[in-house]
Amino acid sequence: MNKRFFLIAIPVVAALYGLDYFLNEYINEYVVRVIMNCGIACILSMSLNLVNGCAGQFSLGHAGFMAVGAYVAATLTTVFPAGPSFQSHLGVGMAILSGGIAAGLAGYLVGLPSLRLRGDYLAIVTLGFGEIIRIVILNIEAVGGPRGLPGIPRLSSFFWIYVWAAITGLVLFRIIRSSVGRALLSLREDEIAAESMGINTAKYKVQAFVISSFFAGIAGGLFAHYQGFVDPSSFSFNRSVEVVIMVVMGGMGSISGSVIGAIIVTVLPEFLRFLDKFRMVVFPLILIILMLLRPMGLLGHKEIWQLFRFKRSLKKAVA
Amino acid sequence: MLEIKNLNVNYGAIRAIRNVSLRVEKGEIVSLIGCNGAGKTTILRAISGLHRPESGSVTLDGIELTQLKAHNIVRKGISQAPERRGIFPNLTVFENLLMGGFTRRLSPADYDKVYGLFPRLGERRQQVAGTLSGGEQQMLAISRALLAQPKVILLDEPSLGLAPQITKTIFETIQRINKEGTTVLLVEQNAHAALKIANRGYVIEVGEIILSDAADKLLHNDDVRKAYLGEI
């Protein structure tokens, strides 16, 4: 927390606050909705990137963690008798944080079997886990079961979603740049070699899962308090796949890539609405073409600013 | 220094290593030679904790290693340049080296030392490791193991798939590393090259040590010459 951090953080927070006001006053609700969805998608894809992209552990259960976060946060503010005392910005913030922590714990539980599994097998286990969470929720009558949980205070604004997105991005970026991040990268590259470099692979895998699912839970909490309603079908397998698409398309291990991936996957279908029933034919087609053109993802392993720096140094080398 | 006693290692129901005992004294280069599938790599994996032995003991300066996890064994002073090099292909040379020093704090002098041993790596420090040639990758694997500042470095087939000229360079560097104070346990199929730089040697066949002697004696041993040095 040095001076430079505040020098950047304060204007960013102020700008977000101003934008929040501006969007609510002048922009139509549909556009605002898409922008909010983008923010939530960014948190999801950035957090999944830590596990899928950096550590190379293919997880298909991200929606499950999101569901844990969403339901825990929504239960605190809506179902609990003490709920109304949570119905302030601070209260909702606390509830969302609790949702994140609960999801983090769930991530710990999934992280454990991942120690012995890799590749496709891990994907199946995490997929199964995500579905188990959804089906458990489906059968808890207290949170509405299949009917869903209505009446959640709609308190997560543009401001809160993007503040959390910024926090997610910052935290994950710092992690990736630290020795923990390097340990995760080496895990992806060659697990046995990593172990013989003195890296406690078990510890770092579980850490990655916990951090990643914590932020997924945060995204879930934000989602619940912005929709005002959650039901188990919002957290189906499709949602997990969507997040994986964002990560793969943006570039494995690239935080800025995940953001771009999240924006494309969220916004593109909206732009294609004019195609009516062909929308969901054209959208996947565009994804296929994108992946054919950039098989390593839009940004590859790099961050967006590294890409530009590289081009600049290339130009210098040519000149 | 490094002492292995009555080591037995299984892969499932198959016993890969039978009652192997060997020792490496401080400052030595010891070569372990044998053909495909003899169990050379398995012994190294058992030493560095990547594969848990069935029974027997591995001690370094009297400290028992068999119960420790691989990542803790590195901290005790053993590091390995694994078979087929095991480098991280999508990371740069520099990042690979950084991983080698994961267990400790690296100073620029550490890198300079490695770049001194292998100038080629210094030139290519920003290059992605997967795009290095085989020889350069081997240099990287050895350097990476060195950066953990081991007491004993385990080298698994450093000559694998390399041109004779590069093999020669690498073996010369191994000698140099040894002179600078690191004890070396070398596993090789290239018996000639391995014995030439070693103080002592062990010959392993189907999981058992059948011969052990001073390296120059092994070089002139008739059985070894027939079996491993391609002479009739």
Image (spheres, grey):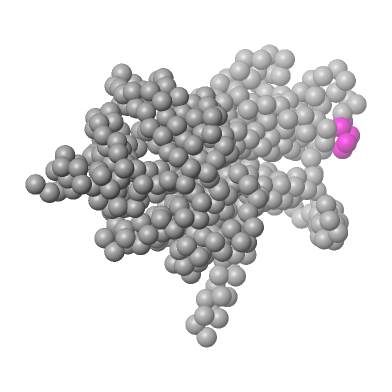
Seen from the viewer's position, the closer of residues B40 and A157 is: B40
Residue extending farthest bottom: A319
Task: Classify residue B60 as left or right of residue A78.
Answer: left
**Image height check: is A196 above or below B161?**
above
Task: Classify residue A101 as left or right of residue B39.
Answer: right
Task: Classify residue A155 as left or right of residue B174.
Answer: right
Q: How many marks?
A: 0
Q: Give the quadrant of residue A306.
A: bottom right
Q: Is residue B214 visible?
A: yes
Residue drawn at (80%, 30%), measured in percent from left and top? A95
Residue drawn at (30%, 52%), measured in percent from left and top? B196
Q: Give the quadrant of residue A133.
A: top right
Residue drawn at (48%, 42%), measured in percent from left and top? B26
Q: Is residue A185 visible?
A: no
Q: Give the quadrant of residue B210.
A: top left
What kind of secondary structure does the magenta stretch mostly adopt?
Answer: helix
Q: Position of residue A181 (x, y in %)?
A: 61, 47
Residue drawn at (85%, 23%), measured in percent from left and top? A83
In magenta stretch: residue B180? no
Q: Position of residue B216 (x, y in %)?
A: 28, 48
Q: Which residues are magenta?
A: A87-91
In magenta stretch: residue A89? yes
Q: Position of residue B199 (x, y in %)?
A: 36, 47
Q: Position of residue B51 (x, y in %)?
A: 42, 29
Seen from the viewer's position, the closer of residues B76 and B13 is: B76
